[in-house]
Image: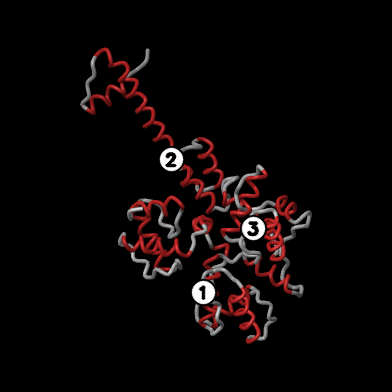
Amino acid sequence: MRSFTLPLALMAGLGLTAPVAAQGDFEDVIGGIAQTLIQQELDRNAYIAAQTANTPAAYRDYLAKFPKGQYRVNAERALERLGAPVEGSAAAAAQIEARLGISFAQRVAVQRELTRLGYRTYGTDGVWGRNTRSAIAGWQRDRGDAATGYVTEAQVRLLLRGAVVTPPDDGTTAGTLSAAQTEAGLRLTRTQRVTIQRQLSDLGYDAGVADGLWGSRTRTAIKGWQQANRRAATGYVTAAQVRLIAQQAGSAAPPADDEVNGAALEEQLLGLTLDERVDVQRRLRRLGYDPLRTDGTFGAGTRRAIGEWQADEGVEATGYLTADQVRLIRVETGG
């Protein structure tokens, strides 16, 4: 016989009564609520167990059991932090592309081919920003592929008409292409590029606006610095040169790319424009979290403000934003 002990207990606790004729239906409703609460508790316990183990296998097990669980996003972020993002996610696609070691010349060639095919990249400078990512995603979508905005080896071969994709060399060979490949191998983040631009400007080499986009002005500044320091004036930096620039500018070198955690990668994938970053900083200030500056550069002050806001929201205080958090900040400040 079906038991209604829990539903009736809930009814009593809520001080509810129902007509006899409708009581059966009402018990079904309360029973459904009870089942939802039980399911939520199972979900929560499973996620806590995954957190305790803190391994890719544990988080994948949680996602397998609760594919639409209330902690799904948290589990996916944890996998990214552990270097094992969920297959098919943007972070996983980004890792796959990064491992290809696409050279600077190949990046330019891909942009040109996409433009020729009608997918506007708005530039063929070898820098794959938001416009290039949108062009890649559009091309992928029209092919019936997953529109991640990040290419696979097979897709690069197709766009380059069969050209072989090889990892960047160790920088021992000569020539501009090798220099570009060497720099590409550093996997400098947008924040790292902004830092280097500022350091060059501080040293008297005008790198233009410190926006992380290394165009002709930044390349000229790098060449000028290289010439002054008796290095080959390639316009592309090596790891040793990044450290020397930081040393001369009296600041620490930008953190190595392997120090950038999954939270930072997730924020990077948002592709926030300078105006959007300024807007976030201003909204944080309106909420009472002072980023110190509202220049679109997420420095220590902004990271601290984001972390304090996250802590007050009851989420992990990483100091890096997710898409949902950007939207929430906008909602909290009036949209």
Alpha-carbon distance for marks 3 and 1? Answer: 26 Å
Alpha-carbon distance for marks 1 and 2? Answer: 42 Å
| Residue position marked by numbered label 3 in the rendering | 98
Of helix, strand and loop, which one carries label 1?
loop
| Residue 33: % across, % down | 35, 28
Alpha-carbon distance for marks 2 and 3? Answer: 31 Å
Residue at x-position 68% and y-position 82%: 231
| Residue 306: % across, % down | 39, 60
First in sequence, mark 2 or 3: give its number. 2
Which amino acid, by three-letter code, is at mark 2? Gln
Residue 120 placement: quadrant: bottom right
First in sequence, mark 1 or 2: give its number. 2
First in sequence, mark 3 or 1: give its number. 3
| Residue 66: % across, % down | 49, 36
Residue at x-position 65% and y-position 74%: 236
Residue 193 placement: quadrant: bottom right
Of helix, strand and loop, which one carries label 2?
loop
In this rendering, position of residue 159 left or right of residue 255: right
Q: Which mark is residue 70?
A: 2
Q: Is residue 18 above or below residue 61?
A: above
Which amino acid, by three-letter code, is at mark 3? Ala
